[in-house]
Amino acid sequence: MRKQQQGFTLIEIAIVLVIIGLLLGGVLKGQELIQNARVRNVIAQQDGIKAAFFGFQDRYRGIPGDYSPTLANQNIPGAGTTCGGNGDSLIKNTTFTGSASSENICAWYHLSKANFITGSYSGSGTTENANNSPVNPFGGPMQIIYDSTYSDPSGSPSSVHNIKTGINIPASILAEVDRKLDDGYPSSGAFRFSTYGSVTAASCIVAGTAPAPDTWSIASGATVCGGASLF
């Protein structure tokens, strides 16, 4: 006689459902941990570069990148005369006499040669890339510069020194960075959305209708965004 095949018991089904729940919970928790680590990494980069900027200014009485090639050669070990600026205390995307590269590129070169940041940067060029500037956790080259390339409700922001996070960062991560560092809104405070790297505002922020502020476009799942820390 053939033995009659039996189905799963309620206990067996319950055990399977518990296991599936634990697996799903583990996956979701793992994703949350990864997300939090990336947020912390972006924040650490911003804070570290600010500290390096002010440390350089305090030691050399000058601004990295804007520091003249002559002074860099005299005071920064190994810097040579290849990179520097005009000494007007502003980091600009401009090449001055005596330097083959723009000040925003020379800034990373000076900071690294002076051991205020880790990494080795070429100090060559006028546009940031992985060879002449640090990159964020998503591979986007960062920027330190005096400009107005950041979001502002007035539509006409004033030029200030700022650190660009670089592109390829999800809006959800930038929103969390903004909440931890500032007010959580992309067009106000010390941390803002930036179009640096040809990022479009429409893809990364949701325009608010006054008096409601702009918000980060989290629901859209935007992943190619960038921000700027103003100082």
Image (spheres, rainbow, N blue to C red):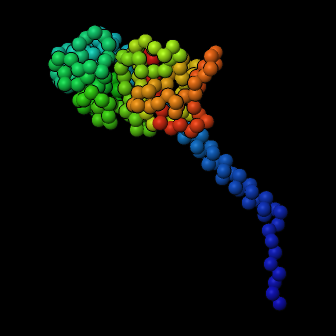
In the image, taking residue 88 as reference, residue 37 lies left or right, namely right
Q: Nearer the viewer, residue 57 or 189?
A: 189
In the image, taking residue 97 as reference, residue 156 lies left or right, namely right
Residue visible at 61% across and 48% down in the picture: 27
Percent coordinates x, y for residue 194 in the rendering = 46, 25
- Tell me which corner region of the image, top left, top right, bottom left or bottom right, holds residue 5: bottom right
Location of residue 66 with respect to 195 vertically, above or below: above
- Quadrant into which the N terminus falls: bottom right
Residue visible at 32% across and 36% down in the picture: 130
**Residue 35 visible (yes or no):** yes
**Residue 44 visible (yes or no):** no
The number of discs equals 0
- Tell me which corner region of the image, top left, top right, bottom left or bottom right, holds residue 29: top right
Percent coordinates x, y for residue 106 in the rendering = 27, 23
- Quadrant into which the C terminus falls: top left
Residue visible at 47% across and 30% down in the picture: 200
Q: Nearer the viewer, residue 22 or 162?
A: 162
In the image, taking residue 216 as reference, residue 132 lies left or right, namely left
Percent coordinates x, y for residue 39 in the rendering = 52, 32
Residue visible at 81% across and 87% down in the picture: 2
- Tell me which corner region of the image, top left, top right, bottom left or bottom right, holds residue 62: top left
Percent coordinates x, y for residue 30 in the rendering = 59, 45
Outermost residue on the bottom side: it is: 1
